[in-house]
Amino acid sequence: MSFELRDHTADVAVAASAPTRSALFAAVADGLAAAGCDEIPETGGDRFDVEVRAENVEALLFDYLDQLIFERDVRAVMPVDNEASVEERDGEWVLTGSARGVSLDEIDAREIKAVTYSEMRVEETDEGWEAYVVLDV
């Protein structure tokens, strides 16, 4: 599982790859955290749960990242060490997961305003799964 930050006009993009769709979502979420701060403490912060539902995989990724941004704003924490499980249930996509919330007071954080649908893609490849997401900074 990996991610890479890429410059994108006035925004930043996360390109991620992983062997499974679930690991891919966690990697993109870790990319969101990396876009928000340069150094993430290895310890500290409490884990919190996340659950998101959507009509398709791209919408699920969008809503998941949007939920993590919401959690950052409401809890005043940076969601890091993300874990995700993605599955289709009765025609609906469901993500259940968790993140460790590092207090924004403990890090030098940049604001990520929003996730965008611009150029978003989630696809299966011969090597596993890949995603590309543009974040509004």
Image: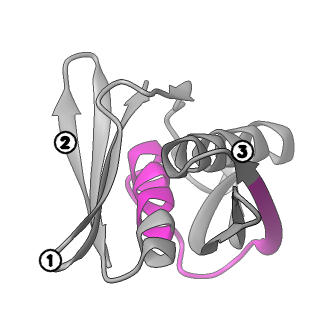
Label 2: which residue? 6
Q: CA distance from mark 2 to mark 3?
A: 22 Å
Mark sitting earlier along the chain (3/1): 3
Residue 18 painted magenta: no
Name the disc covering residue 126, or none: 1
Secondary structure beneath label 1: loop
The residue positioned farthest toward the top in the image shown: 10
**Disc 3 target residue:** 67
Relative to 129, say whether 7 is above or below: above
Judged from the image, the secondary structure of the residue bearing numbered disc 2 is strand
The relative height of residue 5 versus residue 97 in the rendered view (above or below) is above
Percent across and percent down for residue 38 are 37, 53
Picture residue at 49% right of the left edge, 45% below the top: 58
* Left or right: where 58 falls relative to 5: right
CA–CA distance in space, label 2 to label 1: 23 Å
| Residue at 49% in and 54% down | 33
Left or right of 127? Residue 41 is right
Q: Amino acid at mark 2?
A: Arg
Residue 4 placement, left or right of 81? left
Q: Nearer the viewer, residue 23 or 136?
A: 23
Label count reads 3
How far apart marks 3 and 1 lie (CA) works out to 30 Å
Task: Tell me where the magenta segment starts and ends, as one range.
Answer: 26-52
- The kind of residue on which mark 3 rests is Gln
For marks 2 and 3, the one nearer the N-term is 2
